[in-house]
Image (cartoon, rainbow, N blue to C red):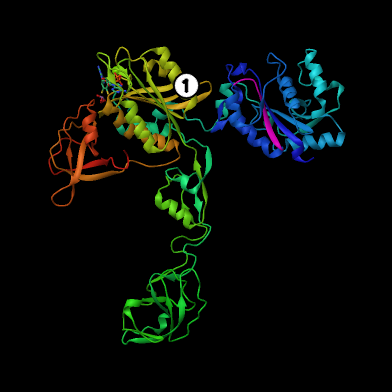
Amino acid sequence: MDKKAITGLILAGGRGSRMGNADKGLQPFRGSTMAQHVIERLLPQVGSVMVNANRNLDAWLELAAPVWADETPGFAGPLAGIEAGLRHCATPWLLAVPCDSPFLPHDLAVRLAAAVEDADADVAFAATQEGGMRPQAHPVFCLVKASRLAELSRYLAEGGRRVDGWYKDLKAVEVLFEDGDAFRNINTLEELHGLDDTLPPSLAKVVSCLSGYDPDALPVRDAQRVIRDFVQPVRAIEKVALRAALGRVLAQDVISPIDVPAHDNSAMDGFALRGADLRSDAPVSLRVIGSAFAGSPSGLVPGPGECVRIMTGGVMPAGCDSVVPQEFVTQDGDSVTLPAGVIRLGDNRRFAGEDLKAGSAALQRGRVVRPPDLGMLASLGIPEVAVQRRLRVAFFSTGDELRSVGEPLAEGCVYDSNRYTIYGMLQRLGVDVIDMGVVRDDPQALEQALRSACENADAIITSGGVSVGAADYTKQVMSKLGDVTFWKIGMRPGRPLAFGRIASNGRSAFLFGLPGNPVAVMVSFYFFAREALLRMMGAEAPLPLLRARSGVAIRKKPGRTEYQRGILSTGADGQPEVRITGSQGSGILRSMSEANCMVVLHDEQGNVRSGDMVDVLVFEGLM
Ligand SMILES: Nc1nc2c(c(=O)[nH]1)N[C@H]1C(S)=C(S)[C@@H](COP(=O)(O)OP(=O)(O)OC[C@H]3O[C@@H](n4cnc5c(N)ncnc54)[C@H](O)[C@@H]3O)O[C@H]1N2
Ligand code: MOO
Ligand SMILES: [Mg+2]
């Protein structure tokens, strides 16, 4: 049977009652969703795939189209789904499979098709047999003749619901498969998570690797380590045209299909010659036998005492290994003379493949594509590349005192600035942003916002409400929704931080609850969230710290990390020198805006004297 004669149908119309009424197929599983795994198994076996679903139709349409709902009302079970499938089936055969069977056999269609053809049957369904026991039927995995719709509808109308009940008057064959696990369906979230080897370990487990862990006095580097070990890359990949790859993360190594340059060629306008003709003690005269222009190999083969006029990029004539630039020679008719010792053998020749060899990795996965990379990919003739899909990051601010730009400022209120700094920092990372506005200090509103963020994004960034204030419900709601920890970090500014992973309706997202103070929010973003988001994007890009001389004395207590806003300039001696911008209060955004860098004073460090060297994070390129 030609696979084009078969339409695949994914049965996803159930209530998911054993999974807390979740839409089973849409549950995250091994980097995508359970149904996506089913589609990946099924699609190669059939002409096309459709879905039977009764809710979340938009989400299903994103996965596969078309999507058909049951006609028989009241969640009548898989048969109602098969009925809807048969009604819309444009091929002679329909192959139904449940949406919660991500391991279904790769040869399901071929074997069921062979069976219906052999037996001239209307239906074939799968079965497995455990050693010595009676075969166990899996009637939901079935290949059905599309013309049998009428019998099925009649059975349903009479109230029949048994999956193998409707074909008692039809010719049905059972096909025995060896691998029982292939038909395993996943019924509970525990089962699903147990099978998902891509899930992060619990925070408790990650934290247990630290010695002397104290959430109320956590060193910066320990917090960074926990975050690094806990977040997971998003696995989805897409192909994009070369230019669209700028700023994206390569999902695969790019292997050079060609040598670059493709030929030995000249690095100068001049004369290509045979090194054996060169003399170190006397001038040499050579006869010019022709010209070699870039882009058109000359085909010339000079003999001893001969040379070829060559342009930069011209293919080296056979036997030539050196080029003398034209300004070094005197030309007389068709002969050139070069003085003794102006060049050595091999000068001004570029080798084939000296830039890149065919078969070697031109760029490695995980790299954020920059302008020279675009050029290099173009030099390899590569029109499109595989990149990680863009990360989706939702963010909102919390606090009853916050007003959004455009609203009047009531007594005691402040304008929400964090959503703007966060927006800017996220844009610079190249993620897709979902701005969720300001959320009130109200447990219900916070829960709703966090759930919605979780269902639509890979990561969530909030600001405010993570300290100890009376209206800070944020922490309580975050804990309720997942595995979240609350730290007081040994740093200034940015002491409180919430971090973890929350889940809602089967979707999950990593959560960064940044402190509310406007400078603290930025510092926490750069030193904790940034690296984690890049990691989720599949990229590794540690913060580049430079060393600079402090032009001033800085007071600093050992035992915590301090981030001071600074201005980096060139000192009188031409060396980089940094000075602290005025007030360092964690609410003073102006000094952040004036700064062009941050001085990073590590835990061990005490007071800094003028002239001491310090670490500096330069904002240019980050901001
Ligand atoms: N008794 C203690 N009080 C505080 C501590 C502490 O350890 N013990 N930590 C202080 C530190 S450090 C920080 S940082 C803040 C963090 O507090 P929250 O994360 O709970 O943030 P809020 O209380 O909501 O706001 C703090 C501050 O920032 C202003 N804010 C908040 N969001 C925005 C925004 N989107 N745009 C502009 N300004 C914002 C808010 O109005 C407050 O003034 O807690 C200290 N207290
Ligand atoms: O940690 Mo908070 O640092 O006042 O800004
Ligand atoms: Mg607070």
Could you tell me the amino acid type at mark 1?
Answer: Ser
In the rendered structure, the answer to whether residue 59 lies left or right of residue 142 reads left
In the rendered structure, the answer to whether residue 75 lies left or right of residue 491 reads right
Could you tell me which residue is drawn at 35 percent across and 77 percent down? 326
As drawn, 330 above or below 470:
below
Return the x and y of residue 213 as percentages of the image width and height. 33, 27
As drawn, 387 above or below 399:
below
Q: Quadrant of the C terminus?
A: top left
In the rendered structure, the answer to whether residue 251 lies left or right of residue 179 reads left
Q: Quadrant of the N terminus?
A: top right
Could you tell me which residue is drawn at 75 percent across and 32 percent down? 90
Dividing the picture into quarters, in which one does residue 161 lie?
top right
Number of dots carrying numbers: 1
Q: Which residues are the magenta region?
A: 47-55
612 or 202, nearer to the observer: 612
Return the x and y of residue 197 as percentages of the image width and height. 54, 32
SS label for mark 1: helix
> Magenta stretch containing residue 51, yes or no?
yes
Q: Which residue is mark 1?
A: 452
Q: Quadrant of ligand 3?
A: top left
Return the x and y of residue 62 as percentages of the image width and height. 58, 30
Residue 151 visible at all: yes
Q: Residues within 10 Å of mark 1 (few under 14, many from 20)?
A: some
584 or 308, nearer to the observer: 308
Residue 603 visible at all: no
Q: Main secondary structure of the magenta part?
A: strand
Return the x and y of residue 244 as percentages of the image width and height. 47, 44
